[in-house]
Protein backbone atom coordinates (compact mmCIF):
# COMPACT_ATOMS: atom_id res chain seq x y z
CA UNK A 1 0.00 0.00 0.00
CA UNK A 2 2.65 2.51 1.04
CA UNK A 3 5.10 2.89 -1.79
CA UNK A 4 7.35 5.77 -1.00
CA UNK A 5 6.88 6.86 2.58
CA UNK A 6 5.55 10.41 2.64
CA UNK A 7 3.03 11.61 5.16
CA UNK A 8 0.72 8.86 6.16
CA UNK A 9 -0.76 7.69 9.39
CA UNK A 10 0.70 4.66 11.04
CA UNK A 11 -1.91 2.17 12.19
CA UNK A 12 -1.41 0.32 15.45
CA UNK A 13 -2.59 -3.09 16.61
CA UNK A 14 -2.02 -3.67 20.31
CA UNK A 15 -2.07 -7.23 21.62
CA UNK A 16 -2.54 -7.67 25.36
CA UNK A 17 -2.99 -10.80 27.45
CA UNK A 18 -5.28 -11.68 30.30
CA UNK A 19 -6.08 -14.37 32.88
CA UNK A 20 -2.82 -16.35 32.70
CA UNK A 21 0.56 -16.06 31.06
CA UNK A 22 1.73 -18.51 28.46
CA UNK A 23 -1.33 -18.19 26.21
CA UNK A 24 0.80 -17.91 23.11
CA UNK A 25 0.31 -14.17 22.84
CA UNK A 26 3.51 -13.74 20.86
CA UNK A 27 2.60 -16.34 18.29
CA UNK A 28 -0.92 -14.89 18.08
CA UNK A 29 0.44 -11.39 17.53
CA UNK A 30 2.85 -12.71 14.88
CA UNK A 31 -0.01 -14.53 13.16
CA UNK A 32 -2.07 -11.36 13.15
CA UNK A 33 0.88 -9.74 11.41
CA UNK A 34 0.97 -12.55 8.85
CA UNK A 35 -2.73 -12.15 8.19
CA UNK A 36 -2.39 -8.40 7.65
CA UNK A 37 0.62 -8.96 5.42
CA UNK A 38 -1.45 -11.44 3.44
CA UNK A 39 -3.93 -8.58 2.91
CA UNK A 40 -1.18 -6.66 1.14
CA UNK A 41 -0.13 -4.46 4.06
CA UNK A 42 3.43 -3.87 5.22
CA UNK A 43 3.80 -4.83 8.86
CA UNK A 44 6.34 -4.08 11.58
CA UNK A 45 6.25 -4.98 15.24
CA UNK A 46 7.28 -3.91 18.71
CA UNK A 47 7.53 -6.15 21.76
CA UNK A 48 7.20 -4.57 25.19
CA UNK A 49 8.78 -6.46 28.07
CA UNK A 50 7.91 -4.87 31.39
CA UNK A 51 11.04 -6.11 33.16
CA UNK A 52 13.89 -3.97 34.43
CA UNK A 53 16.69 -5.57 32.44
CA UNK A 54 17.66 -3.18 29.65
CA UNK A 55 17.92 -6.14 27.32
CA UNK A 56 17.69 -9.92 27.38
CA UNK A 57 21.47 -10.35 27.11
CA UNK A 58 21.95 -10.98 30.81
CA UNK A 59 18.97 -13.28 31.26
CA UNK A 60 19.31 -17.01 31.74
CA UNK A 61 17.91 -19.01 28.82
CA UNK A 62 16.84 -21.58 31.38
CA UNK A 63 14.56 -19.10 33.06
CA UNK A 64 13.47 -16.96 30.18
CA UNK A 65 14.04 -18.92 27.00
CA UNK A 66 16.70 -18.13 24.44
CA UNK A 67 18.31 -14.77 23.92
CA UNK A 68 17.47 -13.84 20.35
CA UNK A 69 20.09 -11.88 18.43
CA UNK A 70 19.29 -9.28 15.77
CA UNK A 71 21.36 -8.00 12.84
CA UNK A 72 22.27 -4.86 14.78
CA UNK A 73 23.52 -6.94 17.70
CA UNK A 74 20.47 -6.38 19.88
CA UNK A 75 20.01 -9.19 22.40
CA UNK A 76 16.28 -9.42 22.69
CA UNK A 77 13.29 -11.42 23.82
CA UNK A 78 12.59 -14.58 21.83
CA UNK A 79 9.25 -13.18 20.66
CA UNK A 80 11.16 -10.96 18.27
CA UNK A 81 12.32 -14.19 16.67
CA UNK A 82 8.69 -15.15 16.13
CA UNK A 83 8.05 -11.81 14.45
CA UNK A 84 11.11 -12.05 12.24
CA UNK A 85 10.26 -15.60 11.20
CA UNK A 86 6.55 -15.12 10.68
CA UNK A 87 6.77 -11.78 8.91
CA UNK A 88 10.15 -12.33 7.24
CA UNK A 89 11.40 -8.96 8.49
CA UNK A 90 14.54 -7.69 10.21
CA UNK A 91 13.94 -5.84 13.43
CA UNK A 92 16.21 -3.53 15.40
CA UNK A 93 17.12 -3.58 19.08
CA UNK A 94 14.73 -0.69 19.65
CA UNK A 95 11.82 -2.89 18.53
CA UNK A 96 12.13 -4.49 21.96
CA UNK A 97 11.11 -2.02 24.68
CA UNK A 98 11.84 -2.87 28.28
CA UNK A 99 11.14 -0.95 31.48
CA UNK A 100 14.91 -0.73 31.91
CA UNK A 101 15.41 0.94 28.53
CA UNK A 102 12.65 3.49 29.14
CA UNK A 103 13.82 4.39 32.63
CA UNK A 104 17.39 4.62 31.45
CA UNK A 105 16.40 7.02 28.67
CA UNK A 106 14.38 9.17 31.08
CA UNK A 107 17.09 9.19 33.76
CA UNK A 108 19.76 10.07 31.17
CA UNK A 109 17.59 12.95 30.04
CA UNK A 110 17.10 14.08 33.62
CA UNK A 111 20.87 14.02 34.22
CA UNK A 112 21.37 16.16 31.14
CA UNK A 113 18.97 18.68 32.63
CA UNK A 114 16.53 18.30 29.76
CA UNK A 115 13.51 18.45 32.06
CA UNK A 116 14.36 22.03 33.00
CA UNK A 117 13.98 21.68 36.74
CA UNK A 118 10.68 19.81 36.65
CA UNK A 119 9.89 16.93 38.98
CA UNK A 120 10.39 13.84 36.82
CA UNK A 121 7.52 11.42 37.28
CA UNK A 122 6.09 8.16 35.97
CA UNK A 123 3.17 10.12 34.56
CA UNK A 124 3.82 12.06 32.34
CA UNK A 125 7.56 11.54 31.80
CA UNK A 126 7.81 7.75 31.67
CA UNK A 127 4.48 7.43 29.88
CA UNK A 128 5.47 10.11 27.34
CA UNK A 129 8.81 8.41 26.76
CA UNK A 130 6.99 5.13 26.04
CA UNK A 131 4.70 6.76 23.50
CA UNK A 132 7.53 8.63 21.79
CA UNK A 133 9.55 5.41 21.61
CA UNK A 134 6.68 3.53 19.99
CA UNK A 135 6.02 6.26 17.42
CA UNK A 136 9.70 6.53 16.53
CA UNK A 137 10.37 2.81 16.22
CA UNK A 138 7.16 2.05 14.31
CA UNK A 139 8.53 4.21 11.47
CA UNK A 140 11.75 2.19 10.99
CA UNK A 141 11.44 0.13 7.78
CA UNK A 142 12.00 -3.56 8.50
CA UNK A 143 11.16 -5.26 5.18
CA UNK A 144 13.88 -3.83 2.94
CA UNK A 145 11.38 -1.53 1.26
CA UNK A 146 11.56 2.25 1.44
CA UNK A 147 9.38 4.14 3.87
CA UNK A 148 7.64 2.99 7.00
CA UNK A 149 5.25 0.04 7.25
CA UNK A 150 1.47 0.43 7.18
CA UNK A 151 0.72 -1.32 10.46
CA UNK A 152 2.69 -1.76 13.65
CA UNK A 153 1.74 -4.71 15.85
CA UNK A 154 2.62 -4.00 19.48
CA UNK A 155 2.69 -6.87 21.92
CA UNK A 156 2.53 -5.99 25.59
CA UNK A 157 4.28 -8.75 27.53
CA UNK A 158 2.87 -10.07 30.79
CA UNK A 159 -0.73 -10.10 31.91
CA UNK A 160 -3.06 -7.12 32.29
CA UNK A 161 -3.04 -5.97 35.91
CA UNK A 162 0.63 -6.80 36.60
CA UNK A 163 2.28 -4.09 38.68
CA UNK A 164 5.21 -4.06 36.28
CA UNK A 165 3.13 -3.23 33.25
CA UNK A 166 1.19 -0.33 34.79
CA UNK A 167 3.24 2.51 33.20
CA UNK A 168 2.86 0.77 29.85
CA UNK A 169 -0.91 0.25 30.12
CA UNK A 170 -1.30 3.86 31.16
CA UNK A 171 0.88 5.02 28.27
CA UNK A 172 -0.97 2.81 25.79
CA UNK A 173 -4.33 4.08 27.03
CA UNK A 174 -3.17 7.64 26.37
CA UNK A 175 -1.67 6.53 23.10
CA UNK A 176 -4.89 4.98 21.81
CA UNK A 177 -6.65 8.26 22.53
CA UNK A 178 -3.90 10.28 20.91
CA UNK A 179 -3.73 8.35 17.64
CA UNK A 180 -7.48 8.18 17.65
CA UNK A 181 -10.20 5.77 16.62
CA UNK A 182 -9.57 4.35 13.18
CA UNK A 183 -5.84 4.12 13.84
CA UNK A 184 -5.76 1.80 16.83
CA UNK A 185 -7.07 -1.71 17.33
CA UNK A 186 -6.81 -3.57 20.62
CA UNK A 187 -6.86 -7.35 20.62
CA UNK A 188 -7.08 -8.96 24.02
CA UNK A 189 -5.90 -12.57 24.20
CA UNK A 190 -7.60 -14.43 26.99
CA UNK A 191 -8.47 -17.90 28.22
CA UNK A 192 -11.80 -19.69 28.26
CA UNK A 193 -11.21 -22.75 30.41
CA UNK A 194 -13.37 -25.86 30.42
CA UNK A 195 -13.91 -27.48 33.78
CA UNK A 196 -13.69 -31.17 33.20
CA UNK A 197 -16.33 -32.01 35.80
CA UNK A 198 -19.05 -30.00 34.00
CA UNK A 199 -17.55 -29.75 30.54
CA UNK A 200 -18.70 -26.14 30.31
CA UNK A 201 -16.74 -23.28 28.71
CA UNK A 202 -16.23 -20.64 31.39
CA UNK A 203 -16.35 -16.99 30.39
CA UNK A 204 -15.87 -15.40 33.79
CA UNK A 205 -12.05 -15.16 33.80
CA UNK A 206 -12.21 -13.30 30.47
CA UNK A 207 -14.96 -11.00 31.77
CA UNK A 208 -12.79 -10.10 34.75
CA UNK A 209 -9.73 -9.49 32.71
CA UNK A 210 -11.61 -7.25 30.25
CA UNK A 211 -12.98 -5.31 33.20
CA UNK A 212 -9.38 -4.85 34.36
CA UNK A 213 -8.39 -3.66 30.91
CA UNK A 214 -11.21 -1.13 30.79
CA UNK A 215 -10.39 0.20 34.23
CA UNK A 216 -6.95 1.01 32.85
CA UNK A 217 -8.41 3.02 30.01
CA UNK A 218 -8.11 0.39 27.30
CA UNK A 219 -11.10 -0.78 25.28
CA UNK A 220 -10.79 -4.07 23.40
CA UNK A 221 -11.95 -4.21 19.78
CA UNK A 222 -11.41 -7.93 19.50
CA UNK A 223 -11.26 -10.80 21.97
CA UNK A 224 -9.11 -13.76 21.03
CA UNK A 225 -9.94 -16.59 23.39
CA UNK A 226 -7.72 -19.57 23.86
CA UNK A 227 -9.85 -22.65 24.31
CA UNK A 228 -9.48 -26.32 23.44
CA UNK A 229 -12.52 -26.25 21.14
CA UNK A 230 -14.36 -23.49 19.26
CA UNK A 231 -16.41 -21.23 21.55
CA UNK A 232 -20.05 -22.13 21.87
CA UNK A 233 -22.48 -19.54 20.57
CA UNK A 234 -24.00 -18.82 24.00
CA UNK A 235 -20.53 -18.28 25.45
CA UNK A 236 -19.76 -15.81 22.69
CA UNK A 237 -23.03 -13.99 23.37
CA UNK A 238 -22.27 -13.80 27.06
CA UNK A 239 -18.76 -12.49 26.43
CA UNK A 240 -20.12 -9.99 23.95
CA UNK A 241 -22.68 -8.71 26.40
CA UNK A 242 -20.38 -8.41 29.39
CA UNK A 243 -17.28 -7.25 27.57
CA UNK A 244 -19.01 -4.92 25.09
CA UNK A 245 -17.37 -6.53 22.09
CA UNK A 246 -19.51 -7.54 19.08
CA UNK A 247 -19.90 -11.32 18.85
CA UNK A 248 -18.33 -11.34 15.37
CA UNK A 249 -15.21 -9.80 16.91
CA UNK A 250 -14.79 -12.71 19.31
CA UNK A 251 -12.34 -15.21 17.91
CA UNK A 252 -11.51 -18.63 19.31
CA UNK A 253 -7.90 -19.67 19.29
CA UNK A 254 -8.60 -23.35 19.62
CA UNK A 255 -5.82 -25.91 19.70
CA UNK A 256 -4.20 -26.57 16.33
CA UNK A 257 -1.67 -29.27 15.38
CA UNK A 258 1.03 -26.68 14.66
CA UNK A 259 1.35 -22.90 14.97
CA UNK A 260 1.50 -22.30 11.22
CA UNK A 261 -2.25 -22.96 11.18
CA UNK A 262 -2.90 -19.83 13.22
CA UNK A 263 -3.03 -17.25 10.42
CA UNK A 264 -5.68 -19.25 8.55
CA UNK A 265 -7.56 -19.97 11.76
CA UNK A 266 -7.77 -16.20 12.27
CA UNK A 267 -8.76 -15.64 8.66
CA UNK A 268 -11.49 -18.29 8.78
CA UNK A 269 -13.06 -16.40 11.67
CA UNK A 270 -12.76 -13.14 9.75
CA UNK A 271 -10.34 -11.57 12.21
CA UNK A 272 -8.88 -9.52 9.34
CA UNK A 273 -12.29 -7.94 8.70
CA UNK A 274 -12.56 -6.87 12.33
CA UNK A 275 -8.99 -5.51 12.45
CA UNK A 276 -9.18 -3.72 9.11
CA UNK A 277 -12.54 -2.30 10.11
CA UNK A 278 -11.12 -0.92 13.35
CA UNK A 279 -8.16 0.55 11.45
CA UNK A 280 -10.21 2.07 8.64
CA UNK A 281 -8.34 0.00 6.12
CA UNK A 282 -11.19 -2.00 4.64
CA UNK A 283 -11.03 -0.13 1.35
CA UNK A 284 -7.27 -0.41 1.04
CA UNK A 285 -6.50 -4.02 1.90
CA UNK A 286 -7.26 -7.02 -0.28
CA UNK A 287 -8.67 -10.40 0.68
CA UNK A 288 -5.93 -12.31 2.48
CA UNK A 289 -3.89 -14.75 0.46
CA UNK A 290 -2.57 -17.41 2.81
CA UNK A 291 -1.97 -20.21 0.34
CA UNK A 292 1.65 -20.77 1.29
CA UNK A 293 0.95 -20.73 5.00
CA UNK A 294 -1.95 -23.11 4.73
CA UNK A 295 -0.18 -25.59 2.52
CA UNK A 296 2.94 -25.50 4.69
CA UNK A 297 0.88 -26.00 7.85
CA UNK A 298 -0.99 -28.89 6.31
CA UNK A 299 2.02 -30.57 4.79
CA UNK A 300 3.76 -30.31 8.15
CA UNK A 301 0.95 -32.31 9.73
CA UNK A 302 1.25 -35.03 7.14
CA UNK A 303 4.95 -35.76 7.48
CA UNK A 304 5.61 -39.33 8.49
CA UNK A 305 9.19 -40.29 7.80
CA UNK A 306 11.19 -39.28 10.85
CA UNK A 307 14.62 -37.66 10.97
CA UNK A 308 16.15 -37.93 14.44
CA UNK A 309 18.42 -35.14 15.57
CA UNK A 310 20.17 -35.31 18.91
CA UNK A 311 20.71 -31.89 20.47
CA UNK A 312 23.54 -32.17 22.95
CA UNK A 313 23.18 -29.16 25.15
CA UNK A 314 23.07 -27.68 28.57
CA UNK A 315 19.52 -26.39 28.86
CA UNK A 316 17.73 -29.48 27.63
CA UNK A 317 15.00 -29.05 30.28
CA UNK A 318 13.32 -26.08 28.59
CA UNK A 319 12.89 -26.25 24.82
CA UNK A 320 12.41 -22.46 24.64
CA UNK A 321 16.10 -22.19 25.54
CA UNK A 322 16.83 -23.34 22.01
CA UNK A 323 13.75 -22.00 20.22
CA UNK A 324 15.40 -20.63 17.07
CA UNK A 325 17.49 -23.75 16.74
CA UNK A 326 14.37 -25.90 16.87
CA UNK A 327 12.65 -23.70 14.33
CA UNK A 328 15.65 -23.85 12.01
CA UNK A 329 15.66 -27.65 12.24
CA UNK A 330 11.94 -27.67 11.60
CA UNK A 331 12.15 -25.38 8.55
CA UNK A 332 14.82 -27.63 7.07
CA UNK A 333 12.98 -30.88 7.85
CA UNK A 334 9.67 -29.64 6.48
CA UNK A 335 11.26 -28.51 3.25
CA UNK A 336 12.77 -31.98 2.87
CA UNK A 337 9.45 -33.61 3.80
CA UNK A 338 10.74 -35.20 6.95
CA UNK A 339 9.14 -35.34 10.37
CA UNK A 340 11.56 -33.78 12.81
CA UNK A 341 12.20 -35.79 15.96
CA UNK A 342 14.46 -34.05 18.45
CA UNK A 343 16.21 -36.08 21.10
CA UNK A 344 17.46 -33.90 23.91
CA UNK A 345 20.71 -35.18 25.30
CA UNK A 346 21.94 -33.44 28.46
CA UNK A 347 25.62 -32.95 27.66
CA UNK A 348 26.85 -33.81 31.14
CA UNK A 349 25.02 -37.15 31.04
CA UNK A 350 27.34 -38.56 28.40
CA UNK A 351 30.45 -37.71 30.43
CA UNK A 352 32.45 -40.52 32.07
CA UNK A 353 31.68 -39.16 35.51
CA UNK A 354 27.95 -39.76 35.02
CA UNK A 355 28.69 -43.41 34.20
CA UNK A 356 29.76 -43.78 37.85
CA UNK A 357 27.37 -41.39 39.53
CA UNK A 358 24.19 -42.08 37.58
CA UNK A 359 24.65 -45.07 35.28
CA UNK A 360 21.00 -45.03 34.16
CA UNK A 361 21.17 -41.44 32.95
CA UNK A 362 24.49 -42.21 31.26
CA UNK A 363 23.06 -45.19 29.40
CA UNK A 364 19.91 -43.34 28.41
CA UNK A 365 21.91 -40.38 27.07
CA UNK A 366 24.25 -42.56 25.02
CA UNK A 367 21.32 -44.55 23.69
CA UNK A 368 19.71 -41.36 22.41
CA UNK A 369 22.95 -40.15 20.86
CA UNK A 370 23.56 -43.46 19.16
CA UNK A 371 20.01 -43.58 17.81
CA UNK A 372 20.30 -40.19 16.11
CA UNK A 373 20.61 -39.59 12.37
CA UNK A 374 22.36 -36.31 13.04
CA UNK A 375 24.01 -34.53 15.98
CA UNK A 376 23.74 -30.86 16.78
CA UNK A 377 25.82 -29.14 19.44
CA UNK A 378 24.44 -25.65 20.07
CA UNK A 379 26.01 -22.53 21.50
CA UNK A 380 26.52 -22.03 25.18
CA UNK A 381 28.42 -20.33 27.95
CA UNK A 382 30.11 -21.75 31.03
CA UNK A 383 31.89 -25.04 31.43
CA UNK A 384 29.08 -27.36 32.51
CA UNK A 385 28.68 -30.17 29.99
CA UNK A 386 31.60 -29.04 27.83
CA UNK A 387 33.39 -32.40 28.11
CA UNK A 388 30.13 -34.13 27.14
CA UNK A 389 29.80 -31.93 24.08
CA UNK A 390 33.38 -32.81 23.14
CA UNK A 391 32.50 -36.51 23.45
CA UNK A 392 29.46 -36.00 21.22
CA UNK A 393 31.60 -34.31 18.55
CA UNK A 394 34.12 -37.15 18.78
CA UNK A 395 31.35 -39.71 18.44
CA UNK A 396 29.93 -37.96 15.35
CA UNK A 397 33.36 -37.54 13.76
CA UNK A 398 34.49 -41.11 14.32
CA UNK A 399 31.19 -42.70 13.36
CA UNK A 400 30.63 -40.46 10.35
CA UNK A 401 27.32 -39.17 11.74
CA UNK A 402 26.21 -35.80 10.30
CA UNK A 403 27.24 -33.08 12.73
CA UNK A 404 26.56 -29.38 13.04
CA UNK A 405 28.27 -27.40 15.78
CA UNK A 406 27.14 -23.85 16.43
CA UNK A 407 29.34 -21.27 18.16
CA UNK A 408 30.45 -23.19 21.26
CA UNK A 409 29.55 -26.28 19.21
CA UNK A 410 32.18 -25.31 16.65
CA UNK A 411 34.73 -24.44 19.33
CA UNK A 412 34.41 -27.85 20.99
CA UNK A 413 34.69 -29.58 17.59
CA UNK A 414 38.05 -27.86 17.10
CA UNK A 415 39.14 -28.78 20.64
CA UNK A 416 38.14 -32.40 20.02
CA UNK A 417 40.09 -32.48 16.76
CA UNK A 418 43.17 -31.02 18.43
CA UNK A 419 42.99 -33.57 21.24
CA UNK A 420 42.26 -36.64 19.11
CA UNK A 421 44.11 -35.95 15.86
CA UNK A 422 46.94 -33.64 16.94
CA UNK A 423 47.33 -35.53 20.21
CA UNK A 424 47.20 -32.31 22.24
CA UNK A 425 45.71 -33.89 25.34
CA UNK A 426 44.95 -30.69 27.20
CA UNK A 427 43.71 -28.70 24.21
CA UNK A 428 40.97 -26.42 25.44
CA UNK A 429 39.35 -23.04 25.27
CA UNK A 430 40.79 -20.47 27.64
CA UNK A 431 37.16 -19.90 28.67
CA UNK A 432 37.26 -23.27 30.44
CA UNK A 433 40.96 -23.71 31.18
CA UNK A 434 42.91 -20.45 31.26
CA UNK A 435 46.16 -22.35 31.84
CA UNK A 436 45.92 -24.85 28.99
CA UNK A 437 49.19 -25.41 27.12
CA UNK A 438 47.21 -25.83 23.87
CA UNK A 439 44.77 -22.93 23.72
CA UNK A 440 42.88 -23.67 20.50
CA UNK A 441 40.09 -21.30 21.43
CA UNK A 442 40.97 -17.93 22.91
CA UNK A 443 39.39 -14.65 24.00
CA UNK A 444 39.30 -12.45 20.89
CA UNK A 445 37.16 -9.40 21.62
CA UNK A 446 36.62 -6.88 18.86
CA UNK A 447 37.27 -4.03 21.27
CA UNK A 448 39.36 -3.99 24.43
CA UNK A 449 41.19 -7.13 25.56
CA UNK A 450 41.35 -6.09 29.17
CA UNK A 451 37.80 -4.93 29.66
CA UNK A 452 35.32 -7.80 29.89
CA UNK A 453 32.04 -5.89 29.89
CA UNK A 454 30.60 -5.14 26.47
CA UNK A 455 33.22 -7.26 24.71
CA UNK A 456 30.85 -9.69 23.11
CA UNK A 457 31.03 -9.90 19.32
CA UNK A 458 27.38 -9.33 18.53
CA UNK A 459 25.17 -9.17 15.47
CA UNK A 460 25.67 -9.48 11.75
CA UNK A 461 29.24 -9.98 10.47
CA UNK A 462 30.46 -11.11 7.07
CA UNK A 463 32.08 -14.48 6.41
CA UNK A 464 34.13 -14.95 3.24
CA UNK A 465 34.44 -18.42 1.79
CA UNK A 466 38.06 -19.55 1.48
CA UNK A 467 37.29 -22.70 -0.42
CA UNK A 468 34.51 -22.93 -2.99
CA UNK A 469 34.58 -26.69 -3.34
CA UNK A 470 33.19 -27.40 0.09
CA UNK A 471 29.77 -28.31 1.42
CA UNK A 472 29.08 -25.06 3.22
CA UNK A 473 29.88 -22.88 0.19
CA UNK A 474 27.68 -25.05 -2.01
CA UNK A 475 24.85 -25.03 0.48
CA UNK A 476 25.00 -21.25 0.62
CA UNK A 477 24.56 -21.24 -3.15
CA UNK A 478 28.23 -20.66 -4.12
CA UNK A 479 28.19 -17.08 -2.99
CA UNK A 480 31.49 -15.44 -2.09
CA UNK A 481 30.31 -14.41 1.35
CA UNK A 482 27.43 -14.69 3.78
CA UNK A 483 26.18 -12.42 6.55
CA UNK A 484 25.15 -14.21 9.70
CA UNK A 485 24.61 -13.22 13.33
CA UNK A 486 27.11 -13.65 16.13
CA UNK A 487 27.14 -13.77 19.91
CA UNK A 488 30.45 -14.80 21.40
CA UNK A 489 33.73 -13.70 22.95
CA UNK A 490 36.01 -16.61 22.15
CA UNK A 491 37.31 -17.82 18.80
CA UNK A 492 39.63 -20.36 17.25
CA UNK A 493 43.22 -19.34 17.97
CA UNK A 494 44.63 -18.01 14.66
CA UNK A 495 48.11 -19.24 15.67
CA UNK A 496 46.90 -22.83 15.60
CA UNK A 497 45.00 -22.68 12.34
CA UNK A 498 47.76 -23.87 10.02
CA UNK A 499 48.57 -26.85 12.27
CA UNK A 500 44.91 -27.79 12.38
CA UNK A 501 44.61 -27.37 8.63
CA UNK A 502 47.67 -29.50 7.97
CA UNK A 503 46.00 -32.25 9.96
CA UNK A 504 42.88 -32.11 7.76
CA UNK A 505 40.53 -29.59 9.32
CA UNK A 506 39.36 -27.03 6.78
CA UNK A 507 38.54 -23.45 7.74
CA UNK A 508 36.17 -22.87 4.88
CA UNK A 509 34.97 -19.44 6.00
CA UNK A 510 36.82 -16.54 7.67
CA UNK A 511 36.13 -12.88 8.40
CA UNK A 512 37.53 -10.11 6.21
CA UNK A 513 40.83 -10.03 8.11
CA UNK A 514 41.36 -13.77 7.80
CA UNK A 515 41.98 -13.81 11.57
CA UNK A 516 38.59 -14.98 12.74
CA UNK A 517 37.54 -18.52 11.83
CA UNK A 518 33.87 -18.59 10.91
CA UNK A 519 33.24 -22.00 9.33
CA UNK A 520 35.07 -25.22 9.93
CA UNK A 521 34.56 -28.41 7.92
CA UNK A 522 35.93 -31.91 7.80
CA UNK A 523 36.14 -32.56 4.06
CA UNK A 524 36.34 -36.33 4.36
CA UNK A 525 33.30 -36.68 6.54
CA UNK A 526 29.73 -37.05 5.20
CA UNK A 527 28.75 -33.83 6.99
CA UNK A 528 30.82 -32.28 9.75
CA UNK A 529 30.46 -28.52 9.94
CA UNK A 530 30.92 -25.96 12.67
CA UNK A 531 30.11 -22.26 12.57
CA UNK A 532 31.22 -19.47 14.84
CA UNK A 533 28.01 -17.66 13.90
CA UNK A 534 24.42 -18.61 14.67
CA UNK A 535 22.70 -19.41 11.37
CA UNK A 536 19.50 -20.37 13.23
CA UNK A 537 18.52 -16.73 13.72
CA UNK A 538 17.98 -16.14 10.00
CA UNK A 539 16.09 -19.31 9.16
CA UNK A 540 12.52 -18.72 7.97
CA UNK A 541 9.59 -21.01 7.21
CA UNK A 542 10.01 -21.73 3.52
CA UNK A 543 13.56 -20.34 3.55
CA UNK A 544 15.48 -22.84 5.64
CA UNK A 545 18.97 -21.89 6.72
CA UNK A 546 21.54 -23.50 4.39
CA UNK A 547 23.57 -25.41 6.94
CA UNK A 548 20.50 -26.77 8.73
CA UNK A 549 19.18 -27.92 5.39
CA UNK A 550 22.53 -29.61 4.84
CA UNK A 551 22.39 -31.32 8.24
CA UNK A 552 18.90 -32.70 7.70
CA UNK A 553 19.66 -33.74 4.12
CA UNK A 554 22.81 -35.52 5.28
CA UNK A 555 20.92 -37.16 8.13
CA UNK A 556 18.43 -38.54 5.58
CA UNK A 557 21.07 -39.56 3.07
CA UNK A 558 20.00 -36.85 0.63
CA UNK A 559 22.92 -34.46 0.80
CA UNK A 560 24.32 -35.40 -2.58
CA UNK A 561 21.14 -34.62 -4.44
CA UNK A 562 20.77 -31.37 -2.51
CA UNK A 563 24.34 -30.31 -3.29
CA UNK A 564 23.83 -31.28 -6.88
CA UNK A 565 20.85 -28.95 -6.97
CA UNK A 566 22.99 -26.16 -5.54
CA UNK A 567 25.77 -26.57 -8.13
CA UNK A 568 24.21 -23.98 -10.40
CA UNK A 569 26.15 -20.75 -9.78
CA UNK A 570 24.99 -17.73 -7.78
CA UNK A 571 22.49 -19.59 -5.72
CA UNK A 572 20.20 -19.93 -8.72
CA UNK A 573 19.41 -23.52 -7.87
CA UNK A 574 16.34 -24.38 -9.81
CA UNK A 575 15.72 -27.88 -8.62
CA UNK A 576 16.06 -29.50 -5.29
CA UNK A 577 15.51 -33.12 -4.53
CA UNK A 578 12.67 -33.13 -2.10
CA UNK A 579 12.48 -36.72 -1.22
CA UNK A 580 13.28 -40.15 -2.44
CA UNK A 581 10.13 -42.15 -2.69
CA UNK A 582 10.69 -45.74 -3.68
CA UNK A 583 12.77 -45.55 -6.81
CA UNK A 584 11.52 -42.19 -8.00
CA UNK A 585 13.24 -39.00 -6.96
CA UNK A 586 10.77 -36.14 -7.04
CA UNK A 587 11.85 -32.63 -7.77
CA UNK A 588 10.12 -29.43 -6.99
CA UNK A 589 10.94 -25.97 -8.28
CA UNK A 590 11.99 -23.37 -5.77
CA UNK A 591 9.84 -20.34 -6.40
CA UNK A 592 11.12 -16.83 -5.90
CA UNK A 593 10.25 -16.80 -2.23
CA UNK A 594 12.16 -20.01 -1.63
CA UNK A 595 9.19 -22.05 -0.54
CA UNK A 596 9.47 -25.62 -1.71
CA UNK A 597 5.87 -26.01 -2.64
CA UNK A 598 3.78 -28.79 -3.96
CA UNK A 599 4.70 -28.72 -7.63
CA UNK A 600 4.41 -32.49 -7.70
CA UNK A 601 1.35 -32.84 -5.62
CA UNK A 602 3.40 -33.33 -2.51
CA UNK A 603 0.70 -31.76 -0.37
CA UNK A 604 -2.15 -33.30 -2.27
N1 LIG B 1 31.08 -19.26 25.23
C1 LIG B 1 31.54 -19.15 23.88
C2 LIG B 1 32.06 -17.75 23.57
O1 LIG B 1 31.80 -16.83 24.29
C3 LIG B 1 30.46 -19.53 22.91
C4 LIG B 1 29.31 -18.59 22.88
C5 LIG B 1 28.12 -19.16 22.17
O2 LIG B 1 28.05 -20.36 21.92
N2 LIG B 1 27.15 -18.34 21.86
O3 LIG B 1 32.73 -17.56 22.59
Image (cartoon, rainbow, N blue to C red):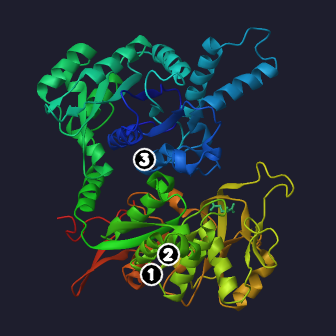
Badge 1 marks a residue whose secondary structure is helix
Between 371 and 130, the one nearer to me in the picture: 371
**Residue at mark 1:** 563
Nearest the viewer among 49 and 480 is 49
Relative side of 581 to 575, left or right? left
User: Around disc 1, counting alpha carbons within 10 Å, would you say few (fewer than 14), some (14 to 19), or many (20 or more)?
Assistant: many
Can you tell which quarter of the image residue 128 is in? top right
**Residue under the image location 77 percent in, 68 percent down:** 430
Q: Are marks 2 and 3 in contact (CB under 8 Å)?
A: no
- Label 2 and label 3: CA atoms lie apart by 24 Å
- In the depicted structure, whether residue 437 falls above or below residue 523: above
Q: Which residue is mark 3?
A: 87
Where is residue 332 shown, x and y percent of the image?
Answer: 40, 67
Say if mark 2 contacts mark 1, CB within 8 Å: yes
Of mark 2 and mark 3, the one earlier in the sequence is 3
Q: Residue at x 44, y 81 (%)?
A: 563
Percent coordinates x, y for residue 145 in the rendering: 51, 45
- Residue 475, label in figure: 2
Amino acid sequence: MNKGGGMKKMKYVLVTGGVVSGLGKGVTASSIGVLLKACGLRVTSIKIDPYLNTDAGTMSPFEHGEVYVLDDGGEVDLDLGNYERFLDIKLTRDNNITTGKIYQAVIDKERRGDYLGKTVQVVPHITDAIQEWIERVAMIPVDEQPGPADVCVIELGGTIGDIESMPFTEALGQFSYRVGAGNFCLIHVSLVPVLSAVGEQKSKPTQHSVRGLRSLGLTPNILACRSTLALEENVKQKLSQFCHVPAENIITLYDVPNIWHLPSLLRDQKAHGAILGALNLLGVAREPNLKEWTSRAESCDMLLEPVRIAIVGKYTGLSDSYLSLLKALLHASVSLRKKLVVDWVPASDIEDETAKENPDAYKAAWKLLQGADGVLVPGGFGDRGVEGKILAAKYARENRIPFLGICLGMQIAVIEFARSILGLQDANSTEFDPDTTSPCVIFMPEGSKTHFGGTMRLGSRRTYFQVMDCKSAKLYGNRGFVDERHRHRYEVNPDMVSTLEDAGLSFAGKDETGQRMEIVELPNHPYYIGTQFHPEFKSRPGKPSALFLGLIAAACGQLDSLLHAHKIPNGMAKKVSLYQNGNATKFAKIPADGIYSNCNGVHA
